[in-house]
Image (tube, rainbow, N blue to C red):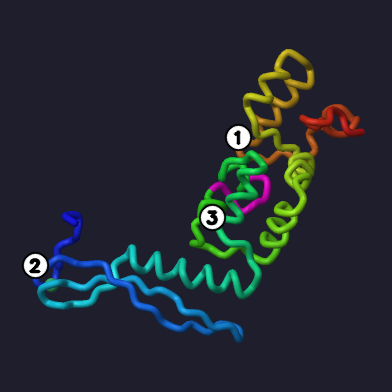
């Protein structure tokens, strides 16, 4: 490979990726985990590069998640895609902010207990995301909103969408505006 980095210590050798295994114990469970590092072919120096640190951290987090029955990043991603949400949209609906799901899905960050519970609910019940939308008054799909733009309802959805975009949060706009309840994109007025 000609993409190998030059060794900064000797200035001549190339850093070759290496993998070790080590036994990690956590809360009574143990498993062989992979440790990534690099070795120089000239000075034989052994280095843990930033990308090694990230990969090693993910290995540990995945193991901790399995021990604690926390959904893995790939499982969270499947749930999100099944719900038709972008990572940013999921961060708005579930909470956590616009970058939370990219971290959860990369196994860079373990969701807190409340988030884990919500994600697990959404994994087994595909109405959870819809209910969250109604709870938060969030209409995330600009394309869907445009379908209603000619009607009065559409105008109110635009208001809600604009509120979300401007970051003020949209909660009970439906009830506040109409006194009738909220408008559900799939089911219509819910009184
Ligand atoms: Zn070297």
Nearest the viewer among 46 and 110 is 46
Q: Is residue 156 above or below residue 11?
A: above
Q: Quadrant of ligand 1?
A: bottom left
Q: Are marks 1 and 3 in contact (CB under 8 Å)?
A: no
32 on left or right of 119: left
The first of marks 1 and 3 along the sequence is 3
Q: Which residue is at the front of the view, 130 or 77? A: 77
Range drawn in magenta? 92-98
For label 1, the crowd category at 10 Å Cα-Cα, with few meaning under 14, some 14 to 19 and many 20 or more, is few
- Disc number placed over residue 165 in the picture, else none: 1
Q: Is residue 82 left or right of residue 133?
A: left
SS label for mark 1: helix
From the image, which quarter does the C terminus lie in? Answer: top right
Q: Residue at x 58, y 83 (%)?
A: 29
Say which residue label 3 marks.
105
Image x and y of residue 71, in percent:
62, 62
- Distance from label 3 to label 2 (Cα)? 37 Å
In the image, the residue with mark 2 has its CB under 8 Å from the nearest atom of ligand 1: yes
| Residues at circles 1 and 2 in contact by the CB criterion of under 8 Å | no
Label annotation for residue 49: none
Residue 52 location (% of width, % of height): 34, 67
Q: Position of residue 69 (x, y in %)?
A: 65, 69
Mark 3 burial class by Cα count in 10 Å: few <14, some 14-19, many 20+? many
Q: Secondary structure under badge 3?
A: helix
- Give the Cα separation between the discs numbered 1 and 3: 24 Å
**Disc 2 designates what residue?**
11
Where disc 2 sits, the SS reads loop
Kindly indicate the quadrant of the structure image that contains residue 34. Answer: bottom left
Is 93 magenta? The answer is yes
């Amino acid at each position: 490979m000609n993409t190998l980095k030059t060794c900064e210590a000797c200035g001549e050798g190339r850093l070759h990726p290496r993998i070790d295994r080590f036994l990690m114990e956590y809360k009574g469970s143990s498993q062989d985990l992979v440790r990534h590092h690099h070795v120089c072919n000239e000075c034989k120096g052994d280095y843990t590069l930033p990308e090694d640190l990230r990969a090693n951290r993910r290995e540990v987090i995945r193991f901790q998640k399995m021990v604690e029955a926390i959904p893995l990043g790939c499982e969270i991603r499947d749930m999100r895609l099944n719900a038709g949400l972008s990572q940013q949209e999921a961060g708005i609906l579930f909470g956590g902010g616009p970058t939370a799901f990219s971290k959860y899905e990369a196994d860079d960050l373990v969701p807190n207990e409340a988030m884990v519970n919500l994600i697990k609910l959404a994994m087994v019940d595909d109405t959870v995301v819809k209910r969250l939308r109604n709870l938060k008054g969030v209409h995330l799909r600009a394309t869907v909103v445009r379908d209603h733009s000619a009607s009065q309802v559409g105008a109110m959805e635009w208001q809600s969408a604009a509120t979300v975009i401007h970051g003020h949060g949209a909660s009970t706009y439906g009830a506040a505006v109409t006194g009738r309840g909220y408008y559900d994109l799939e089911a219509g007025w819910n009184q």
